[in-house]
Image (cartoon, helix red, strand yellow):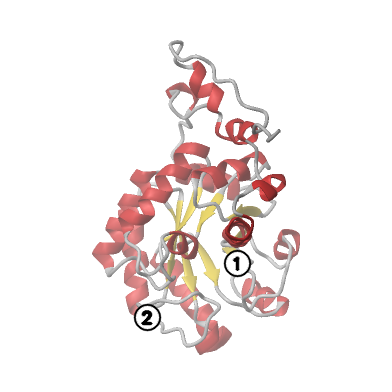
Amino acid sequence: MPYVIGADLPTAPAGERFRALLDRPEILRMPGAHLGLSGLIAKKHGFEALYLSGAAMSATMGLPDLGMITIEDVCFFVRQVARSTGLPLLVDGDTGYGEALNVMHMVRSFEDAGGAAVQLEDQVLPKKCGHLNDKKLASLDEMYAKVAAARKARRHLYIIARTDAVASEGMDGAVARAKAYLEAGADAIFPEALTTPEMFREFASRMPGVKLLANMTEFGRTPFLTAEEFQALGYAMVIWPVSHLRVAAKAWEQLYGQIAKDGGAQNAVDRMQTRAELYETIGYHKYEELDASLVRTVVPVAMPQRG
């Protein structure tokens, strides 16, 4: 039902609903969906939680994923997806937008915007995608302080500490950092850019009883693994952070090329979501029916053809 009907809104805080999903035995699958429309389509296919990728939000704004966007930029995306879907959202908080007080402001802002969980990473600015080279890490003490600050600021937000340490400090260093972050108050750990199933299995075996998140990104260092395979390796959550954006951007590329070539979009109609399908996805008529003064719109079936 439309989000404007108060009686239909979730009553439990988003973070509590996220925790409840993790209490189940099966792995929690979270595709990236940083726009209201993409979130609705993901929900239609049965996903119960979503991931808001910093890389996807940055790219949508025409910016690289180097920690350039702000807390308020991110909250714009959080609000629209939380509002339109009602699903718990795991939000990419990058490095926390500064130091301890900035992290606390981030937590309060994400909760107020409707977020359920935050991912906080142990790089320094300018941060990089976890699957790129030459990442620079914050000291353990600096990241410990940020995690502790997030824990102090949250009411219900679920805190996931990401470590990029495997690439520069090895498995021992990543495990040591992860244990320290748990001590600081993290609820779960995200070991980034592991490169083999055996590495995923080893990390999980050294973190018994800890909720772990796996990142299944394309064009990175992790081989393709399914949600079921990650679960068998000991992981409670998996994200596909930018898959939706990559598919959409490729479609935009093809469409604009076709318009430039053909002088219009008439030869791309078979690849388009129809107006009726769009209206069904966003619940157009349900909103319309809430106001009896609106005349129900008749959706054109097709464009007029030339004689």
For image coordinates 54% across by 16% down, the residue present is 296
Q: Is residue 185 above or below residue 47?
A: below
Residue ID for mark 1: 215
Query: For the view shown, which residue lies furthest in the top direction?
Result: 292
Query: For the view shown, which residue lies furthest in the front direction?
Result: 307
Q: Position of residue 29 (x, y in %)?
A: 64, 53
Type of the residue with mark 2: Ala
Q: Is residue 122 above or below residue 268?
A: below
For image coordinates 52% across by 47% down, the residue present is 18
Crowding at dot 1, Cα within 10 Å, few <14 / some 14-19 / many 20+, comes out as many
Q: Position of residue 33 (x, y in %)?
A: 54, 52
Q: Position of residue 149 (x, y in %)?
A: 31, 63
Type of the residue with mark 1: Asn
For image coordinates 59% across by 71% down, the residue present is 207
Q: Quadrant of the N terminus?
A: top right
SS label for mark 2: loop
SS label for mark 1: strand
Q: Quadrant of the C terminus?
A: top right
- Residue 214 as seen in the image, left or right of residue 160: right
- What's the mark number on residue 138? 2
